[in-house]
Image (cartoon, rainbow, N blue to C red):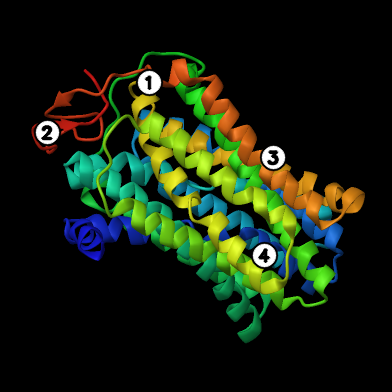
Amino acid sequence: MAAGYLDILRARHAARLLTGTLVGRLPNGTASIAIVLFVRAEGGSYSVAGALAAVYGLATAVGQPLLGRAVDLYGQPRVQLPAAVVSALGMALLAVAGTGSLPLAHAAVAVAGLFTPPLEGGLRALWPSVLGGEDRVHRAYAMDAVAQEVMFTAGPLLVTLLTALWSPATALLVINAIGVLGALSVVLCEPSRAWRSAPREAHWLGALRSPGLLALLGSFFFVGLALGSITVAAMAYADDRGRESVYGWLMAALGLGALIGGAVYGARQWAGAPERRLRVIVALLAAGYLPLVLTPGPVAMTVLAAVSGVFLAPAVACSFIVVDRHAPRGTVTEAFSWLVTTFGVGAAVGTAVAGPAVELGGTAWSFAVAGAGGVAALIVLLATGSVLAAPARTAVAVRGSENDRNGAVEPGFSSGHQA
């Protein structure tokens, strides 16, 4: 298992691109907790903190596909680094100005969210030119999904540490400065500088004109909804038990399950169409969420949380392959950015729905939202099987792809970017 991942990391530029992307995404992965800690330190209410975090999330959802399209049109360095700098300046404005003027605070986080660089989509567009073989690219997608879990686990711990050592304002400034350095590392890397998207057909819908991509986005909206609802449901469960530490155990178990699932999934080669495989994985994901409504004791609940997370990273990794197969020519970064946006919006909706569910029916109902989200995601995939079975660009053996302008892809690599 480890040998396959080491093979990827030993490839020229791979470790730098992965590390730079994760570091560059640190501000986005820690924004919610950093904003809440900062607002509370300023004497603001949880309502104000929640509103600012929501504005940031919505602005990010809007900005990702727009910036992704800009990357496809103008290249990575001309978009990623300037966006990272502007986003960091937005958070710096919040840190310096505080929450004395709420309109200014909202404007600052809106700018920070809107200009969050689409590093995630950019990395996935680079993998074919960096790694060459199709199997290695698919393994890199799985490693990418696992690395995200590490970032979303370690990032909040770093914010908490910086806050404890200095202040929430310092945490905001340091995290965003680190993010700019990560983006700088990526755009100075040769594959990022050399990458050019394939010529694209002018269309105002861009990547969204692909029916298969729309089907996938519809499904992953509900996957995001399920995951977002679990964060609220786990907190309600911890409150019921009168032990705040239970929340941390549940979320850690969820992350551990995802880490294990992603590592195992990426360690082997998979035969057959990825669209069919995705339906099986999402079915297993839904099956993992449903038992959470039983809300047993903390030990059993922690085990159930770990099991429910096992198929999350494989589902995300497999979705990357499906995106690459269905994105219209010349829209690969935008398509990946739409997946990030849809997943994020779904998570926000899940968080919003789970709260009232707790008040209406208790903790079990909030976990039922997660189960319903998983089932809905599967239903979307089953209902759209015909469009998912017909990729926008049939995968064929080619020497190059839109991600590999210099012909670096190995002969026989099925890139999914048909000329």
Tell me: 363 left or right of 333.
right
Quarter of the view holding residue 122: top left
Residue 38, position as x, y percentages in the image: 72, 69
Which numbered disc, 2 or 3, marks the residue that appears first in the sequence? 3
Badge 1 vs badge 2, beta-carbon distance below 8 Å: no
Residue at the spot of label 1: 328
Residue 41, position as x, y percentages in the image: 78, 74
- Give the alpha-carbon distance from disc 4 to disc 3, as whole Å: 27 Å
Quarter of the view holding residue 270: top left
Which numbered disc, 4 or 2, marks the residue that appears first in the sequence? 4
- Give the alpha-carbon distance from disc 4 to disc 2, as whole Å: 43 Å
Residue at the spot of label 2: 407
Residue at the spot of label 3: 372
- Give the alpha-carbon distance from disc 2 to disc 3, as whole Å: 45 Å
Rate crowding at label 4 as few (under 14), some (14 to 19) or many (20 or more) other CA atoms within 10 Å: some
Helix, strand or loop under label 1? loop
